[in-house]
Image (tube, rainbow, N blue to C red):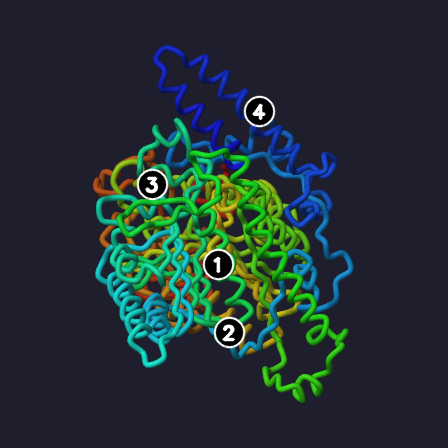
């Protein structure tokens, strides 16, 4: 399915290179898009028998009363090609921003759900359910804590080390990690009773092979010295093959598909994260991490999953060559359909066998229909604490027709009722059309945390990559335009993350049930909720459902203050004033708003760091190099925030800014959530988009 989406994009780009043939390029490009969309509809339509990998139909979007009419009036549905126009990008690097047709979905497989966290038990019909004690779950907060924990776990590993990531960097911190692996392997051989320690590493082939010094060269010494204990697998997407593989430059070929799973496993301890094995992810690139301690069943599952993906990947040899596993179809030289069938069977065997084992176990102990009482379990020697937290691994591998994560995510968004709150964060805002329609059409409140362009990993990059932050800003604008057109500004709010000297890579979802101040469910792992995550890459995350208030508080605390108390969630729009790299000079400590000074004739303005303050009118400059900062590609915006118009007093520490003007130099104000780029702003009125 990913190939069907990638084909039209590449076809259109290639035909556009033919001189004097723009008409042919346009005609064939439109035909290709239409064929690809029709194929996707047929596969996903319940009427055509399209089912997910589990045999369940995908969830159906149920709009609130009147929502469909408002969508029609706003021109957001019923207009041919409108979804494609939203995300069309002129660069091959941004091809994943092209959105496919909205899939038809049915109601979630949880019609009559119990109250509380038990309403999510339907997920175990798709994936294995692991019951654990919340005391075995710890939420990590910083990259440094993540790095130190990994090194410590490697040093004490006795049986297995399993690491799946996009790539391994080549800096000193990454070398330190490799040295820890080498030292642990050496100790396992020299021990009085040698342990059977195995190290399995899964990376992406294209990303891990880029450059002369790369992930492969970093791991070659381990392979050469410990050939019987170390396995390095390099996943190559089956969609990058033939002419496509020859034509796309090395830096851009990862847009076709990647191994994006991030799992770090040491004996029976597991770290689930969205972070890669690179120095920035160990120092100043904020992500999310959860540490599952002494969870043997979960560790076994992810070990088998990584082994399954490794079996369908290329195997790195000590001489820096790669080979396929004996009897396996080659990922880009062999038959694509045969390869995908084999990969689907290998991965689904892992999921189904684990689900069958857990169903037997949970039928005996966990959910009230107990065949084995707690006293009997204690008498049998099982001293594990009773579970109050349930872990569900969600796998998304659309190239192999595995869509579990997509089905579960859409179901969660669909069943979020009025009064529920959904907090969603992503470092790359490019929601699929289905996810966007669910956000716009359901009744729950949404707060979406985005990376401001200054903390985007591509900010300031050379060439085409330098335009990526602006492209995501454009997508934010289009999405917020839809929110405003439906009058949903109070229900759907956008915020941006900004922290000086840091970048932002966190992704996830928190679900607060109606009337609850703490989340009972969170999603954490590698997916970004975007086009590539759903359609092209291999992804894995876990849904954590918990009754423990202590664990709920940990999850809530990260959502309130991602990373540390120094991180700042700027309301979307407030940090728009920092578009040329300017930042708010300081944060105001919590407390009630300061008393206003004597009235002054001129409006109060937001103080920027050495940047020009502008008048009331916001003037969007064209995409390109700013006159004031030619070294950065960004949207240059000028504007002021006035007391009468956009600012309203509120003593909320994490949404305050320093305000300059007559009277006190520091006065806390809250910026209202507003669109990214508005052509005209009038005081006290909605923006014209």
Which numbered circle lies on residue 331?
none
State whether residue 66 is above or below residue 150: above
State the residue position of label 4: 34
- Give the structural element (helix, strand or loop) at label 1: strand
Mark before the other along the chain sequence, 3 or 1:
1
State the residue position of label 2: 137
Residue 381: image quadrant is bottom right
Find residue 412 and report its horizontal and vertical position in percent: 63, 55
Q: 15 or 334: which is nearer to us?
A: 334
- Give the structural element (helix, strand or loop) at label 4: helix
- Name the front one of labels 2 and 3: 2
Find residue 131 and report its horizontal and vertical position in percent: 61, 72
Q: Cβ–Cβ below 8 Å for labels 2 and 3?
A: no
Image point (76%, 56%), residue name? 111
State the residue position of label 3: 635
Q: In this image, 33 relative to 499: left or right? A: right
Mark before the other along the chain sequence, 4 or 3:
4
Q: 646 or 655: which is nearer to us?
A: 655
Q: CA distance from mark 2 to mark 1?
A: 15 Å
């Amino acid at each position: 399915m990913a190939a069907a989406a990638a084909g039209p994009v590449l076809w259109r780009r290639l035909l556009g290179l033919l001189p004097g043939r723009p008409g042919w390029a346009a005609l064939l490009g439109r035909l290709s898009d239409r064929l690809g969309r029709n194929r996707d509809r047929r596969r996903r339509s319940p009427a055509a028998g399209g089912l997910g990998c589990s045999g369940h139909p995908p969830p159906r979007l149920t709009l609130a009363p009147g929502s469909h009419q408002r969508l029609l009036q706003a021109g957001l549905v019923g207009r041919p090609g409108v979804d494609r126009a939203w995300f069309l990008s002129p660069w091959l690097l941004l091809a994943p921003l092209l959105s496919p047709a909205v899939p038809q979905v049915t109601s979630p497989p949880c019609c009559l759900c119990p109250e509380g966290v038990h309403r999510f038990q339907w997920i175990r019909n798709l994936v294995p359910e692991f019951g654990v004690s919340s005391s075995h779950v710890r939420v990590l907060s910083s990259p440094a804590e993540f790095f130190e924990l990994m090194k410590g776990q490697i040093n004490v590993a006795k049986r297995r080390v399993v690491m799946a990531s996009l790539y391994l960097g080549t800096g000193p911190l990454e070398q330190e990690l490799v040295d820890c692996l080498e030292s642990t392997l050496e100790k396992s051989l020299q021990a009085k009773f040698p342990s059977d320690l195995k190290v399995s590493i899964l990376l992406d082939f294209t990303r891990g092979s880029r450059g002369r010094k790369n992930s492969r060269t970093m791991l070659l010494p381990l392979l050469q010295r410990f050939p019987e204990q170390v396995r390095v697998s390099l996943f190559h997407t089956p969609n990058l093959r033939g002419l496509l593989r020859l034509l796309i430059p090395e830096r851009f070929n990862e847009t076709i598909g990647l191994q994006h799973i991030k799992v770090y496993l040491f004996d029976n301890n597991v770290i689930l994260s969205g972070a890669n094995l690179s120095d920035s992810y160990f120092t100043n690139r904020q992500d999310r991490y959860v540490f599952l301690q002494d969870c043997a069943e979960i560790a076994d599952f992810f070990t088998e999953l990584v082994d399954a993906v490794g079996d369908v990947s290329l195997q790195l040899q000590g001489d820096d060559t790669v080979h396929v596993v004996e009897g396996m179809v080659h990922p880009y030289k062999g038959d694509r359909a045969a390869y995908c069938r084999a990969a689907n069977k290998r991965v689904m065997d892992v999921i189904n066998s684990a689900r069958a084992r857990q169903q037997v176990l949970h039928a005996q102990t966990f959910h009230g229909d107990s065949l084995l009482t707690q006293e009997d379990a204690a008498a049998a020697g099982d001293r594990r604490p009773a579970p109050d937290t349930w872990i569900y691994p969600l796998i998304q591998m659309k190239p192999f027709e595995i869509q579990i994560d997509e089905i579960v995510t859409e179901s969660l968004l669909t069943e979020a009722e009025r009064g529920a709150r959904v907090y969603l964060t992503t470092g790359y805002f490019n929601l699929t059309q289905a996810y966007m329609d669910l956000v716009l059409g359901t009744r729950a409140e949404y707060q979406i945390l985005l990376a401001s362009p200054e903390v985007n990993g591509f900010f300031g990059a050379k060439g085409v990559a330098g335009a990526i932050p602006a492209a995501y800003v454009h997508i934010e604008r289009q999405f917020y335009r839809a929110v405003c057109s439906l009058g949903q500004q109070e229900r759907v709010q956008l915020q941006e993350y900004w922290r000086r000297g840091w970048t932002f890579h966190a992704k996830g979802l928190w679900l607060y049930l109606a009337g609850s101040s703490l989340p009972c469910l969170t999603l954490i792992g590698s997916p970004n909720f975007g086009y590539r995550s759903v359609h092209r890459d291999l992804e894995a995350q876990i849904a954590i459902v918990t009754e423990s208030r202590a664990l709920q508080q940990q999850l809530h605390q990260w959502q309130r203050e991602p990373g540390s108390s120094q991180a700042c969630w700027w309301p979307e729009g407030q940090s728009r004033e920092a578009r040329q790299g300017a930042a708010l000079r300081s944060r105001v400590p919590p407390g009630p708003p300061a008393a206003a000074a004597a009235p002054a004739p001129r409006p109060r303005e937001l103080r920027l760091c050495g940047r020009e303050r502008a008048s009331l009118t916001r003037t969007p400059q064209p995409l390109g190099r700013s006159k004031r900062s030619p070294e950065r590609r960004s949207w240059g915006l000028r504007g002021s925030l006035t007391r009468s118009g956009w600012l309203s007093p509120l003593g909320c520490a994490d949404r305050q800014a320093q305000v300059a003007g007559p009277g006190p130099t520091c006065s806390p104000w809250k910026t209202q959530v507003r669109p990214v780029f508005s052509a005209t702003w009038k005081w006290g009125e909605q923006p014209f988009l």
